[in-house]
Amino acid sequence: MVHNICDKHSIASKYLAHLRDINLQKDRSAFRRNTELLGGLFAYEISKTFRYNQIKTETPLGTAISHVPADDIALLTILRAGLPMHQGMLNVLGDVANGFIAAQRIHHKDGSFNVSVDYVTCPEIDGRTVILCDPMLATGASMSKALEAIHDIGKPGKLHIVSIIASSYGLNYIRRLWPKAELWVAGVDEELTAKSYIVPGLGDAGDLAYGGKRDNE
């Protein structure tokens, strides 16, 4: 299932608009902040799907009935573009397990590319509710490679995949390969360029958050 948090008007639409705006993108700190804010909103929406336990909470004047998540959660992120989004989700989710995956495109002279997963640090995930985030879901190749790496470690009890902007192609690709996953987005764009970048998209989220890379990277 695909959940678009901007299907109905909310403040999330403002943050998405600011991330797309080429004039506002000149401020890296603002780009990171807006990405972080959207991450928090995603975490809030996803939290509505968790199981909850009822607890008693002592207040200065008595006892209140409260509810806290019963799910054992692992929050995973694809480096480096996903870091601000990860922090925004962590701000809301609090004391959860964390993991990081380095996946990069290796481009070839004929215009094709393959995805290399170079680094995985991950908690135990068997039976856990796993949330995997990356700001952009273009072809779905990087996300799929990250998911393969996760499933080499263990089998999540429930899987949430979170991207700020996805292409229709990438969404369909991931839904076909990982049909049980819940997908969360803020925008869906129809077009991919010849180099598999999303149009209109917003550009390279990692570069906009942290600066450009050397030409040979």
Image: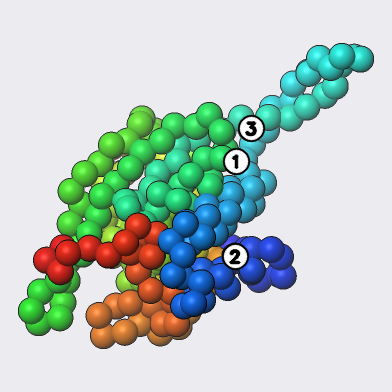
Q: Position of residue 78 (x, y in %)?
A: 34, 51
Instruction: Give residue 36's mark.
Output: none
Residue at the spot of label 3: 69
Is 175 placed left or right of 61 in the picture?
Answer: left
Query: Please, is residue 109 above or below residue 89 in the view?
Result: below
Q: Amino acid at mark 1?
A: Val
- Between disc 2 and disc 1, whose residue precedes? 2
Is 28 placed left or right of 69 in the picture?
Answer: left
Q: Position of residue 23 (x, y in %)?
A: 49, 77
- Between disc 3 and disc 2, whose residue precedes? 2
Residue at the spot of label 1: 92
Residue at the spot of label 2: 15
Q: Amino acid at mark 2?
A: Tyr
- Between disc 1 and disc 3, whose residue precedes? 3
Residues at circles 1 and 3 in contact by the CB criterion of under 8 Å: no
Query: Please, is residue 188 above or below residue 132 in the view?
Result: below
Is 172 placed left or right of 6 in the picture?
Answer: left
Q: Quadrant of the N terminus?
A: bottom right
Secondary structure, mark 1, is: helix
Q: Residue at 43% across / 61% down in the picture?
A: 28
CA distance for labels 2 and 1:
17 Å
Secondary structure, mark 2, is: helix
Q: Residue at 26% across / 85% down in the picture?
A: 194
Residue placed most toward the observer, 186 or 29: 29
Secondary structure, mark 3, is: strand
Q: Amino acid at mark 3?
A: Pro
| Quarter of the rendering containing residue 98 | top left
Q: Position of residue 114 (x, y in %)?
A: 17, 66
Q: Residue at 64% across / 36% down in the picture?
A: 51
